[in-house]
Amino acid sequence: MNEPSFLRPDCDADAARPSLVGLTRDALAAILRRHGVPEREIRMRTGQLWHWIYFQGATRFDAMLNIGKALRAELAGRYSLARPEVVAEQISQDGTRKWLLRLAPVDADDKGAEIECVYIPESDRGTLCISSQVGCTLTCSFCHTGTQKLVRNLTSAEIVGQLIVARERLGDFPGLTPPNDGLLPGEGQRPISNVVFMGMGEPLFNFENVRDAVSVLADGDGLSVSKRRITVSTAGVVPQIAPLGAEAGSMLAISLHAVSDELRDRLVPLNRKYPLKELLAACRAYPGASNARRVTFEYVMLKGVNDSPAEARQLVRLLKGIPAKINLIPFNPWPGTKYECSDWEKIEAFSEIVFSAGYASPVRTPRGRDILAACGQLKSATEKLRARARMVVEG
Ligand code: SAH
């Protein structure tokens, strides 16, 4: 492979030096100021650093040839270009890829939290599903991530780091070669065109960092994922929905899953705090929503729980007046769950009612099941495998 030297994996990485990868323009500018860059040069120098980190995907300071040698050396002495470390990569038969990433430790006791991120190629797009927290505090009764203990917010840099690692693995920086396995989107498509915050965690419990991450992901001089192709999914943290639209400008998805408060209280306990009426009012008022920019409603199909034709009709009534699309998600079972996935005929009948009411209602095909990459299966699956491996070793 004739990769430029700065793209070699032996990047300027050292746990003792904080990484610049994932930082916002403001944060980079503040660092440059601290290192004596005169105010009149800040914009230009920040732009140069930005280009190397986000457009080129540079992993070494000495590749940044248009930045003066002295400044480069100073930066290299104090900072790194480390990204989250890829601990494992799995590739599904259907092209779905899952990466287990280890984050830099936050203190001496921390061994480095782990998160998962999933890549889903389709013919006309490639979607990266990223996490916003390690673990999740929501305890939705059908979701496996909620059973996990450790919880902390990811920094905006750690959120952005997921896209950088994925682009690197998919050969999507200048000078890299994409894998030639026929498992990427079609000709003329960038491998990753869309980003969804549908991995681990509740993005709106980590509002500032998610907002900052969206600004970095969407920057046209760098990673360039259009805001129309960035979707933040929430279980319904109502007070943060308007700020998300106003300050991040991303697309919005709501994990709805039920059409009555009585049932939604049980499936998504956050509903007790922010009931359906308030949630739907916030969606109706979502800044920037229009027929061209619809709010997505996710609805996981649970056998005998939320999958009746009456509930499909009620769903249509509830969403009246909201530019919406509805995503029906077959439930992905996990060991120990009390739920089952609805029968296929039930899902079809539900979808038909929603479709006849004028909504696009694609049923999300489960992807990457062979590598446990499907919705709601992230991380805990890996933890389980580890626990099993430990038992074998210790037993
Ligand atoms: N906390 C945010 C982000 C997580 S998104 C939210 O709730 O929207 C993860 C999506 O996968 C959500 O729509 C969630 O409801 C769905 N999901 C969780 N567990 C699932 C499972 N076992 N099968 C199918 N979908 C699931």
Image (tube, rainbow, N blue to C red):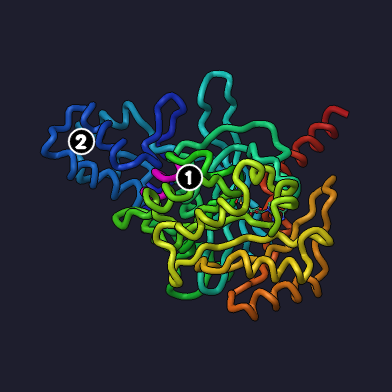
Would residue 391 be seen by someone viewing this image from the given angle? yes
The quadrant the C terminus occupies is top right
Q: Position of residue 252 (x, y in %)?
A: 50, 57
Looking at the picture, how far across and down is residue 197, in whole percent? 53, 51
If the image is split into quadrants, where does the N terminus sit?
Answer: bottom left
Residue 206: percent from left, percent from top? 50, 39
- Give whichever of 127, 140 is nearer the camera: 140
Q: Left of 10 or right of it: where is 313?
A: right
Q: Identify whether 88 is placed above or below 344.
A: above
Q: Quadrant of residue 123?
A: bottom right
Q: Amino acid at mark 1?
A: Gln
Residue holding disc 2: 69
Q: Residue furthest bottom?
A: 356
Could you tell me which secondary element the residue under label 1 belongs to? Answer: helix
Dot 2 beta carbon under 8 Å from ligand 1: no
369 up-or-down from 37: above or below: below
Disc 1: CA contacts within 10 A as few (<14), some (14-19) or many (>=20): some
Residue furthest to the top in view is: 108
Q: Nearer the viewer, residue 322 or 295?
A: 322
Q: Residue furthest right?
A: 395
Q: Which residues are magenta?
A: 209-215
Q: Is residue 229 left or right of residue 308?
A: left
Q: Amino acid at mark 2?
A: Lys
Q: Nearer the viewer, residue 286 or 216?
A: 286
Q: Residue at x 70, y 45 (%)?
A: 140
Left or right of 164 in this view: 116: right
Closer to viewer: mark 1 or mark 2: 1
Which secondary structure class fits the magenta region best?
Answer: helix
In reply to whether residue 211 is colored magenta, the answer given is: yes
Neighbor class of circle 2 (other Cα within 10 Å; few <14, some 14-19, many 20+) is: few
**Is 216 situated above or below 104?**
below
* Residue, disc 1: 240
